[in-house]
Amino acid sequence: MGSRKLREGTRPSPTNINMNNKCVVIIGPTSSGKTSAALRLCKEFNGEIIAADSRQIYKYLDVGTGKLPLDIVGTEINKEAGFWEINGQKVWGYDLVEPGKYFSVVDYKNRVEEFLCDIWNRQKLPIIVGGTGFYIEGILGTKTVAPVQPNFKLRQQLELISTEELVLQLRKVDPKKSDNIDTHNRRRLVRALEVALSGESETSEEKKPSMGVSLIVGFEASHEYLYPRVDRWVEEVFKAGLVEEAKHLIKPGYRDTPQVQGIIYKTTLDLIDGKVSESEAKELIKFDLHRYIRCQETYFRKMKNVTWIDITKQDFDEVLYNKVESYCSG
């Protein structure tokens, strides 16, 4: 998505809108331009962003998690206590915890509720942006989250078995969950088994959301459009210092944490270790991200009350603007 400019001078005045309980949510696969679009909306609608990404909550993982909007020319980044400022626009939800530290969806939801109250108190519009559907549904209240505490002894046992065996075990104890999970993500498989074996239910449907009716906008495009975009992003993050960032994660002892052993960083560490060449690492990361996009799309398509917008259309920005304007004025 390019930087098509939203109409200026037509933003509803914040003094004429009761922002309490109003919230815009932007979902979509990686590299669909969510953050860039949200930054433009912030300028028009007096908004602030809340990131809903299970990787961006971790400190020191910046380049490889897409916190830095590479498609914006002249980006100015200021990291403040509790939030980032990107070209003067506040972004909440980054850098909440160090890699390796336990941080549940419940923890995330509690922090976001604090962000929302602060943003509403200042009569601004929260714009939740993310690619982690479970986080977003937790915020919206369309799924409630049971506070199942971590079982570290069980986790140690599960870490000793193969990913394939984790999938088989989950299929036995929770077939429904096994059909709706990334079967390549060991961290999520271990957590799903931990919850299933606890005897408690991690999620259950809730009739009413925890806030007012939100506008949920989904960004969509064909794989023929998205895959080349994410491939270009991979090339750009290597130029932006992905390898250097991964090296900096080794010295403090973050190398073996689930986050650094996850998508993008694990392959980058293999490059540092000489196990793969740079070209091989790039191709492996691109392949992983293509699969990740498909997983995101599968999850998002099951979400209800989503207004889908094709990001490839020439009038994309205008359609998005009109949707948000109508919602804020309603």
Image: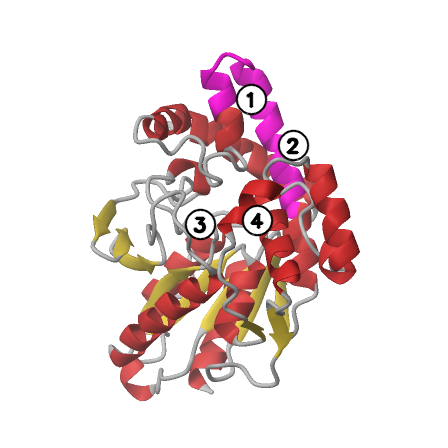
Tag of residue 287: 2
Sequence-first tag of 3 and 1: 3
The part of the image, by quadrant, that contains residue 91 is: bottom left
Sequence-first tag of 2 and 4: 4
- Distance between mark 3 and mark 4 Cα atoms: 48 Å
Looking at the rendered structure, the secondary structure element under dot 1 is helix
- Closer to viewer: mark 3 or mark 4: 4
Do the numbered discs 3 and 1 sit on residues whose CB atoms are within 8 Å? no
Q: Where is mark 3, residue-wise?
A: 3
The percent coordinates of residue 318 (x first, y second) are 51, 65
Would you say residue 292 sits in the magenta stretch?
yes
- Distance between mark 1 and mark 4 Cα atoms: 33 Å
Amino acid marked by disc 4: Leu
- Distance between mark 2 and mark 4 Cα atoms: 31 Å
Tag of residue 154: 4
Tag of residue 281: 1
Q: Nearer the viewer, residue 29 or 40?
A: 29
- Closer to viewer: mark 2 or mark 4: 4
Amino acid marked by disc 2: Phe
Prevalent SS, magenta region = helix
Tag of residue 320: none
Relative to 282, say whether 168 is above or below: below
The percent coordinates of residue 236 (x first, y second) are 45, 30
- Distance between mark 2 and mark 1 Cα atoms: 10 Å
- Closer to viewer: mark 3 or mark 2: 2
- Distance between mark 3 and mark 2 Cα atoms: 27 Å
Q: What's the magenta region?
A: 269-293
Looking at the rendered structure, the secondary structure element under dot 2 is helix
Mark 2 is surrounded, within 10 Å at the Cα level, by few (under 14), some (14 to 19) or many (20 or more) other residues, namely: some
The percent coordinates of residue 245 (x first, y second) are 36, 29
